[in-house]
């Protein structure tokens, strides 16, 4: 039960949220002082932002009389999860059986995406999608729309209404796809620039330049993406790379002059900080060096990679090159909106490669790492003072089994690991967006 005592300050709501508080400052894989954790901690929130975070005993004297205190003692408070690769138009075709990526795209994905030409349809799915993100504790995301500008409009409008920090973009796709989903190099660039001018930087929203993947863009379209990226240096970029062996072969045939699949994007100036490469499984070391040198990020999508049989992400090589790694669901190729379930799959993928992915690292990869990679590290992803107060509360007793395992947990790592292996949306007790409880 949440225990609430009273109200608000003249400048806006001030509240104190008490519980076990955890957040990350850097990657625990490479640093000893990577996180802060207070068993009896508190977040002080004023006007939707973090005013302070620390031990309750230390901060209690600074809590003004009359401040609303929300008591989540025993539960874990972490920054809201951030999903760096998720397709909102694929919400209703999640769990579609298929032998692999290219068949899955033709059979289920493209026919479903066609429906998003209809603004009312797009708006209805956008609303459900936002609910589902929040129900799973995901408070920010880098999201795919469809080729229709109206689909991006629908998600931007829904996110703006809910005051979510979220990015999306219209898909660019001018070949090797059905006519009903095809734009042109010219119309794609024009519509992207128009959406960007209307939504990028509006409230908490950002625009992402979104070429689907190399096979569905002509050289002219990739060149236009590069021009857009140069014209808007602070826009995000997202695409897919080296997900599936058949796809990699196809790209080699389509772009014989490129050294590799990743090199296609590199040639058009699409590798830079704020550029997210989904999957990135079948890479070589030159590719990894380019990703590292340019500051581009990887969105690792383990439930999707397993579901579509795409391959196993190489964590050893990823770390050896210090790749800018983040975790993502890739719904609807991915099979869950839950970042906890995504951690579960990531851990097992890593295990198959003889790599131990710790729970601390996985929580970092779902909070601070994506915030930094998105350029939002001074806004979300941690409890630094001044950050926007997007956070979630995880219940270690959410299910009977999790409760029993949590009772045996002797370390923070063990408790986080139990959440990651046994948890899903049932674990998400409460979700706060800009300090306000989201009604999910
Ligand atoms: N490659 C190109 N489009 C897609 C997509 O929608 N999902 C996945 N997983 N891979 C893709
Ligand atoms: Zn994808």
Image (cartoon, rainbow, N blue to C red):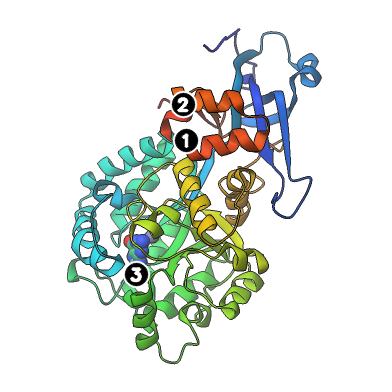
**Whether the residue under disc 1 has CB within 8 Å of ligand 1:** no
Give the SS element for disc 3: helix
Query: Where is residue 275 drawn, in percent x and y?
Result: 53, 65
Which of pointers 2 and 1 lies earlier in the amino acid sequence?
2
Residue 147 position (above or below residue 187):
above
Q: Is residue 52 visible?
A: no
Q: Is residue 201 left or right of residue 22?
A: left
Residue 87 position (above or below residue 10):
below
**Pointer 3: what residue?**
188
**Pointer 1: what residue?**
422
Mark 2 and 1 residues: CB-CB less than 8 Å, in contact? yes
Query: Where is residue 358 drawn, in percent x and y?
Result: 62, 47
Q: Residue at x 32, y 52 (%)?
A: 332
Q: Residue furthest bottom?
A: 257
Residue 248 position (above or below residue 1):
below
**Whether the residue under disc 3 has CB within 8 Å of ligand 1:** no
Query: Where is residue 435 drawn, in percent x and y?
Result: 57, 28
> What quarter of the picture does the C terminus occupy?
top left
Q: Residue at x 62, y 51 (%)?
A: 369
Depth order, front residue of 131/124: 131
Depth order, front residue of 206/330: 330
Q: Residue at x 57, y 60 (%)?
A: 354
Depth order, front residue of 160/36: 36
Give the SS element for disc 2: helix
Instruction: Give the crowd class for mark 2: few <14, some 14-19, many >=20 residues within 10 Å.
Output: some
Instruction: Give the crowd class for mark 1: few <14, some 14-19, many >=20 residues within 10 Å.
Output: some
Which of pointers 1 and 3 lies earlier in the amino acid sequence?
3
Picture quadrant of residue 261: bottom left
**Pointer 2: what residue?**
401
């Amino acid at each position: 039960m949440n225990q609430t005592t009273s109200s608000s300050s003249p400048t806006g709501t001030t509240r104190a949220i008490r519980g076990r508080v955890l957040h990350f400052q850097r990657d625990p894989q490479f640093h000893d002082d990577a996180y802060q954790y207070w068993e009896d901690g508190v977040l002080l929130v004023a006007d939707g932002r973090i005013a302070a975070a620390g031990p309750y005993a230390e901060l209690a004297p600074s809590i003004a009389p009359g401040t609303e205190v929300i008591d989540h003692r025993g539960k874990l408070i972490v920054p809201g999860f951030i999903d760096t690769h998720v397709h909102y138009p694929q919400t209703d075709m999640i769990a579609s059986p298929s032998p692999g990526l290219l068949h899955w795209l033709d059979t289920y994905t493209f026919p479903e995406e066609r429906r998003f030409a209809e603004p009312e349809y797009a708006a209805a799915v956008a609303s459900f999608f936002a609910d589902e993100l929040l129900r799973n504790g995901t408070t920010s995301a880098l999201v795919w729309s469809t080729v229709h500008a109206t689909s991006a409009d629908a998600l931007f409008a829904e996110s703006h209404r809910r005051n979510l920090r979220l990015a999306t973009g219209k898909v660019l796709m001018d070949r090797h796809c059905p006519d009903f989903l095809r734009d042109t190099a010219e119309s794609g660039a024009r519509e992207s620039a128009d959406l960007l001018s209307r939504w990028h930087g509006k409230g908490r929203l950002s625009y992402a330049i979104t070429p689907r993947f190399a096979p569905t863009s002509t050289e002219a379209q990739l060149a236009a993406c590069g021009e857009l990226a140069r014209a808007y240096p602070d826009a995000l970029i997202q695409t897919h790379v080296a997900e599936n062996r058949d796809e990699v072969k196809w790209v080699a045939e389509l772009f014989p002059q490129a050294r590799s699949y990743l090199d296609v994007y590199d040639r058009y100036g699409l590798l830079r900080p704020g550029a997210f490469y989904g999957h990135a499984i079948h890479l070589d070391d030159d590719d990894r060096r380019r990703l590292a040198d340019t500051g581009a990020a990887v969105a690792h999508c383990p439930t999707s990679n397993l579901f579509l049989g795409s391959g196993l992400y190489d964590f050893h090589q990823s770390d050896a090159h210090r790749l800018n790694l983040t975790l993502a669901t890739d719904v609807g190729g991915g099979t869950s909106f839950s970042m906890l379930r995504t951690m579960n799959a990531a851990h097992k993928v890593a295990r198959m490669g003889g790599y131990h992915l710790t729970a601390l690292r996985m929580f970092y990869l779902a909070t601070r790492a994506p915030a930094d990679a998105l350029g939002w590290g001074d806004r979300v992803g941690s409890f630094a003072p001044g950050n926007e107060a997007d956070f979630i509360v995880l219940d270690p007793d959410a299910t009977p089994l999790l409760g029993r395992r949590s009772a045996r947990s002797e370390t923070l790592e063990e408790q986080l690991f139990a959440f990651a292996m046994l948890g899903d949306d049932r674990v998400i007790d409460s979700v706060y967006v800009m300090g306000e409880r989201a009604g999910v």
